[in-house]
Structures are given as C-alpha cells and as structure tokens.
Amino acid sequence: DVKVTQSSRYLVKRTGEKVFLECVQDMDHENMFWYRQDPGLGLRLIYFSYDVKMKEKGDIPEGYSVSREKKERFSLILESASTNQTSMYLCASSFVYQGGKLFFGSGTQLSVL
Amino acid sequence: KQEVTQIPAALSVPEGENLVLNCSFTDSAIYNLQWFRQDPGKGLTSLLLIQSSQREQTSGRLNASLDKSSGRSTLYIAASQPGDSATYLCAVVAANFGNEKLTFGTGTRLTIIP
C-alpha cells in the first residue's frame, strides 16, 4: 500500500515562529503537493513539486515556502506563522503523468496562537 | 478559472437506500475527474478516477459517471451502510499539458442513519 506520512498529527505554534511540516512518501512518486483545508473553502493548493529541487506555486503560496531535497520528502515551511495560517494541512503525492491518482497523508492540524 | 461545486453540502439518508451525490464544474476542458472520501479529521482517500474519454467507472457499490459536455459528474452509492458516512469530494484536472493540479469541490457531508 502507498504510504504518505506527515510528521505531526497536531501542532500548536506561536505567532512569528518558523514552522516546518514534513511529508514523506514511499512510492517513488515524482509529484508531491501541499494543500490546506478550511471549512467552507475546501482544499486549496499551496505548492507542488514535480521533481527534486523543482517547485511551482499553487493558488495560495503567500507566507509559505517549500523544500524538496530528496524525492521522497517534501517540506512546507511557514517563515513567520500567523493566526490566519491555522488550518488543516494535507500532503499528497502521485506519479508524473497528467492527472495521476492522488494519495494523501492523514493531515496536520496546525493551530497558531 | 475552473470552479467545482457540490450540492448539497450535507445529506442524510436511511441505511439501505441508494443515493446520488452531484458534482458540477464550469470548464469542460478537463483531463479527468476524481472522487475522494474523507473521514472526520483525516486525509482523503481516492475512490474513483474517470478519464475525460470515459463515461463511468465502477468499484463495488460505487459508480461514478461523467458528462463532460454538460460539466457534471455523479457518484452513485448503492445499498448505503453506516460505514459510508463521510465527506465526499470531487476534483478535476485541467486538460492543459503539464498541469498536474486538481481543483476541488467543497464536498458533500453524507450521514447514513442506521
């Protein structure tokens, strides 16, 4: 079975802190994605990566950055956390043909106080 | 810009009934459409993927149909069970080359009443 693992299930941080969310997949997928999910707004794409060291902005990249140094690992970085970044963060991966089936991690619920 | 809508936002039906969930999208130039299930506080699980050239896909008690020209998809669940209670989301991939991004609907929260 494909496994996409997010390092933390729940995270509480203070405003201004630098926050790292980690995601690891074990299926040798080329594509990896970071989404955030908010009530009433659905899932919104923050960043995605189609290869090591490659990244593209999604719909809401402001306030976030990403790192992909190894194929299996995709990190989301909140440079200076703010309360409006309180959300459920979901990582996903897929093979690199267009519209590949997406596999999701179980999510990280981040609260910024 | 592609927009995906799922109506209703919530649905409750008695156990054993057949039901249909709806998904509509504004731009018919899609590559495929996927249906996902999400349990409370969890990630998403892919249920069915329909390529733009297909009309439907089936998996067990689930059947998804696609009418690309009208911008609609339905997810049919037969003989519903309490374990089917979850939020169901649809998502589309644009037909643009190299665009791997999905656009999601906001989901339908389904409750099956025992």
Image (cartoon, grey):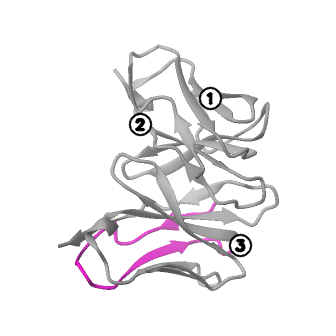
Q: Are marks 2 and 3 on the same chain?
A: no
Q: Amino acid at mark 3?
A: Ala
Task: Give the residue drawn at x 49%, y 57%.
Answer: B45
**Image side of residue A92 versus residue A112, left or right:** right
Q: Is residue A3 magenta?
A: no
Quadrant into which the N terminus of chain B falls? bottom right
Q: Chain of mark 1?
A: A
In primary-sequence order, the first of circles 1 and 2 is: 1
| Part of the protein shown in magenta | B1-29
**Image side of residue B79 versus residue B31, left or right:** left
User: Mark 2 — residue?
Assistant: A87
Against B17, is A62 above or below?
A: above
Q: Chain of mark 3?
A: B
User: Mark 1 — residue?
Assistant: A75
Q: Amino acid at mark 1?
A: Ser
Q: Are marks 2 and 3 in contact (CB under 8 Å)?
A: no
Looking at this rendering, what residue extends furthest in the right direction?
A: B97
Looking at this rendering, what residue extends furthest in the front direction?
A: A1
Neighbor class of circle 2 (other Cα within 10 Å; few <14, some 14-19, many 20+) is some
Q: Amino acid at mark 2?
A: Ser
Q: Are marks 1 and 2 on the same chain?
A: yes
User: Can you tell which mark lies on residue A65?
Assistant: none
| Residue A12 image offset from top left, x and y in percent | 37, 22
| Residue A19 image offset from top left, x and y in percent | 51, 20
Neighbor class of circle 3 (other Cα within 10 Å; few <14, some 14-19, many 20+) is some
Which-is-in-front pick, marks 2 and 3? 2
User: Mark 3 — residue?
Assistant: B29
Quarter-wise, where is residue A69 in the image? top right
Looking at this rendering, what residue extends furthest in the left direction?
A: B114
Task: Give the residue drawn at x 38%, y 53%.
Answer: A40
